[in-house]
Structures are given as C-alpha cells and as structure tokens.
Amino acid sequence: MGKTIAEKIFSKHSKKDVKAGDYTLAKLDMVLVNDITGPLSVMEFQKLGNISIFDKDKIAIICDHFTPNKDIKSAQNVKMLRNFAKEQNIKHFYEPGNVGIEHVMIPELGLARPGYLIIGADSHTCTYGALNAFSTGVGSTDAGMAMATGDTWFRVPPSFKVEIVGKQKKWIGGKDVILHLIGKIGVEGANYFALEFCGEGIENLSIDDRFTISNMAIECGGKAGIFNYDKITENYFKELNIEIPDYIEADKNANYEKSTLIDLSKLDYTVSLPFSPDNTTSINKLEKTFVDQVVIGSCTNGRISDLRIAAEILTNKKVKDGLRVIILPGSPKVYLEALREGLIEKFILAGAAVSTPTCGPCLGGHMGILAEDEVCVSTTNRNFIGRMGHPKSKVILASPAVAAASAVTGYITSPEEVM
Amino acid sequence: MILEGAARVFGNNIDTDLIIAARYLAETNEIELGKNLFKDLRPNFINEMNKGDIIVAGNNFGCGSSREHAPLAIKGAGISAVIANSFARIFFRNAINVGLPIFVTSENLRSIEEGDLLSINASEGILVNKTKNKTYKFDPYPEFLLNLVEIGGLFNFTKNRLEAGV
C-alpha cells in the first residue's frame, strides 16, 4: 500500500516506517508558542530542572495575541517569555516592533518548509500545510516538553483527500473554499484526520489562498491541511531565496479513508453564520443582515493579497456611516508592503482604522471588542458564542472581499454589488 | 480509580471559548481559571456545581483553540472527569497532559440528566448512573496512552526520558 503525505512526513521524522494509526515519537523541525500558551509551556519546561532547550534556532516565541500588552497580566506574561528567550538564547523571539501574527510570520521567516514537521501551541498552526509541511496545534505542555526533547509523540492520522477542480470567478478566494468545505463536512468532519488538498484546481489558488484554507483545517477538526507542492509553492520559496531540495508527494495508491471534491467554478461567496463555522450559507441566500463592525485581518486573512482585495473594493469609497472598520495587517512585512503600495492610505481615506499587527479582536482579546447584540462581519476563523466580546454579540465569518463590500453598505454584501 | 459525582450535562461541539473565554487567558493558575468556567454558557455554573461532579457531553467536546487553560479550568473548578461521545483532538491531548480524567463512549448518554449521581470505574471502563440504575461502557485508552496516563502524564514521561538519556 502506498503512503499519504502525512504518512511520509511522519516516517521521515521517526526511527521507523509508520502508517495511519501507528503511535510514534517524531523529531520536530520547529516548536512554536505565543504569549497566551507560552507562559504555561515555559512553566512546565522549567519544572524539568535546570536544562537547556533542544535547539535555539528551532523554537519560536511570538507574542502576538494580547500585544501590544493589553493589561498588567499580559505584560507580565510577555516579560516572562522575554526573559526565558534571553536566558535560553532563543533566536526567534518577537514582540511589538518586529512581531506579526505567528502564522503569517513563520512562513515569511522561512521557518516552515516542504516536508517539515512542526508543532505549535496554537490551534491554527495547521496553516503551514499550505507549504507542504505537516504542522499541527498542540497544548502548552506538549510544546514545553518538546522544547526540551525536540520531539513529541503522535498518532499518525488517516488522511482525507480533498480534490479541487475548476476555476473560480473573480472575488472568490481561499476563504470561500474552506468555509464551503467546513459547511459540507461539518465541524467534526475531519476530526483526527489530515486533510490533503490536491487536484488540478489548486493551480488556481494563490499561496495566500492556500494559507487561508490550511489555516481553517482545524475548524473541521483537521489535524493538518496539507497542499501538494507545485509551481506556486516553488515560486513562493524562490521569492524568499530559499532552496527547496525536496518535497513530499503522496503515492498513487495511497490510502484515504475519506474524500471529497470541490469544483471552484461552482463556488459562491460563502459566510458562516453564528455560532459555528459550519453554519455556512452562500450570501445570495441570505436576507439583509446588518452589521456594526467589520474586521479584516488575522492569521486567516491578514496577508498582503487579502489587503489588496479589501483596498481595491474600498478605493474612493466611504465606510458606511455608523460602522466601525478595523484592518489588521498580519505582520510588519505585510504592513510595510501595504503602506508602500498605498493601501493604508486608501483604508484611512475610506474611514477605516488600521491597527498594528495583533490577533487582537479575533479571540476577543482587545482592539475591537463587541458590545451586547452587536454583529461583526470578520475575516477571522471562529464565530463561537462570545468569541469577539459580549456573549450576546455575533460574528459572521467571510472573505476579505465580502467584508470590504459590507463595509461600504453596512450589511453583508457581495463584492459585485459595490464594484 | 473510582470517580463519583453529580452529572453536569452539555450538548455537542462545546468549544474551548465556552469552556474558558479568551478574556481570562492571561491567567495561568488552574484554581483562578476554574472560577470562570463556562461563564458565557452557564453564568452560574460554578455556584451550582460541587467538587467531584462529572461532565457528560455529546460529540466534539473541546473543539476550537488549543488553550490548555480549558482542561485546567475544568480541573481547577473541581470537576472529577469528563465523559463524552467524542473529543476534539487537541483538547483530548491537553486533558491527558494536565491529568484531567476523560473518557470516550459510543453509548447514547442522552438519558443522563443534570444532577444524576454518576460513578465511573476507570479501569473497568464502566459508567453507572446510580440515580437511574443504568450502566454504560466506555472505550479503554489505547496502550500507548494508558502507559502515558499511568506514569502521570507527559511531564513524567519527558522527565524519565531525559534522566534515562533516550
């Protein structure tokens, strides 16, 4: 029997050849924590005694969630992480000034590559599947122990093949693809599975579209969301000046326990209504839904192509009266590119607020919390009860194109309606 | 291991934001986290429950974020175990790692009502609803996980490995 991408990556990182269902101790190429999960990881690590981390170049501490520090406790947490990074000589420590959202930054830094095995104490660590890596979210203790040993245990997941065909119309992006998939298979549809995205249609999905898709694999329970390597991946690394000696391809006779097909040409603008990411609908089936706030950013949709789409729609237009629009570039690099391309100016002229990179409002941390009964259309990844603030507030998940169009009208709107 | 307590009944897809909302995540102490358990879902939960109570849930318990604060808050509030039809993967790992007993069963748990007295025999894989005189079976841990639980979780596993140099 042939192997899936997941089986091949785990075999490569284990002392033995493994297949789905096997338990294995596997070596890690990168261990990631943030300012929420990191303090618990460090506390556990320090309980192991007076020891050193396994590799100063393979641990990243990215203070992106509650930064710029929103209160005293958050400041204490970042201080603790800063001291730990210094003590252990950790190369990749980031806080405001050089920090971006972890899942935007790690790829930019070239720390996620084809065939890599990565864990991160953040559920959206699955984002790097876009680059043909196996990356997955774990808890703080897992990450803390891995900082000491450089490996961790896994049960090799079975794989779920998502074959993508066709070509999408303008304004349809990665967000529509992944929301459609989650709506189709449900929030538990891929629990414990590695999603594998393949098929001729992936050539129509930019690297940023792929980051968005892999990022939300966890929203249907996926342990990973891995894309096939192709010209688009190759070009991405060329631009980063990184040589890629090898990538991972599934065998033709690999075993998939589940599979599904997505035809990009049939996709419509898709949103997830409260209070679950699988509560999806295409927006032409939606009655007029007014919003109080628009958020464009996050590890899901805070990349330069996302901001370009939003800027194209907002150029020479005004944010609807009474609406708050908050735009969060995903990293300093994205911010600077947006600034140089004139996107930031367009946003400000339209009447949007532009924030420093942070996870901020996505998880109800800060920088755009919702009041009772308020509704927000957001390019983020979760619309659970109370996710962005008051337990009686609501979040509707959408693409940057739909979010920007809605910023103009004040209700959930298709980009075609305003362009 | 025998665990006994009153049932606290929840539905499907209880996410980690509902277990412990993000606004409490700057906290790392499990007792403090426990004070805000299920705040947005059942604001009075912490006053209604007693130490030792057992959470009974449907599918996909603990979906969403990887916050270890979620099993810590449950443990810190004094809940003795969670039994559900399925768990989200990261939550399951975290619970094992922090020493919160959790069990998976394929049996239909819907006849269990809030407050029913439950007893769990972990080694035999049996849940008894003493109020309704009904017995349910649950799945034993796979061998690898059983070993991990028996030595006291991932921390001890790692410490032993570091000491043995393997």
Image (tube, helix red, strand yellow):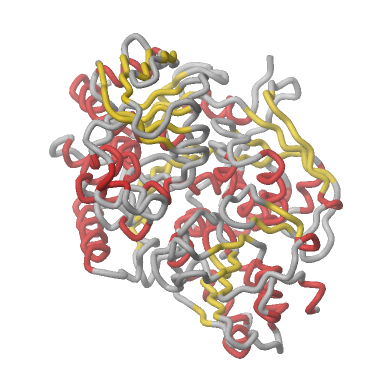
Instruction: Give the side of residue A79 with respect to residue B129, left or right.
Output: left
- Snapshot quadrant of residue A9: top right
Q: Quadrant of the N terminus of chain B?
A: top left
| Residue at 60% over, 25% down | A158
x and y, in percent, of residue A358 in the image: 43, 67
User: In this view of the protein, can residue A308 be seen by the observer?
Assistant: no
Please state which of residues A84 and B156 is positioned toward the viewer in this rendering: B156
Q: Quadrant of the C terminus of chain B?
A: top left
Which residue in the rendered view is the most extreme toward the top?
B124
x and y, in percent, of residue A22 in the image: 50, 17
Please state which of residues A202 and A375 is positioned toward the viewer in this rendering: A375
- Snapshot quadrant of residue B161: top left
| Residue at 79% over, 53% down | A204
User: In this view of the protein, can residue A117 be seen by the observer?
Assistant: yes
| Residue at 54% over, 55% down | A382
x and y, in percent, of residue A298 in the image: 52, 62
x and y, in percent, of residue A398 in the image: 65, 62
Label count reads: 0
Please state which of residues B141 and B151 is positioned toward the viewer in this rendering: B141
As drawn, A223 above or below A283? above
- Snapshot quadrant of residue A289: bottom right
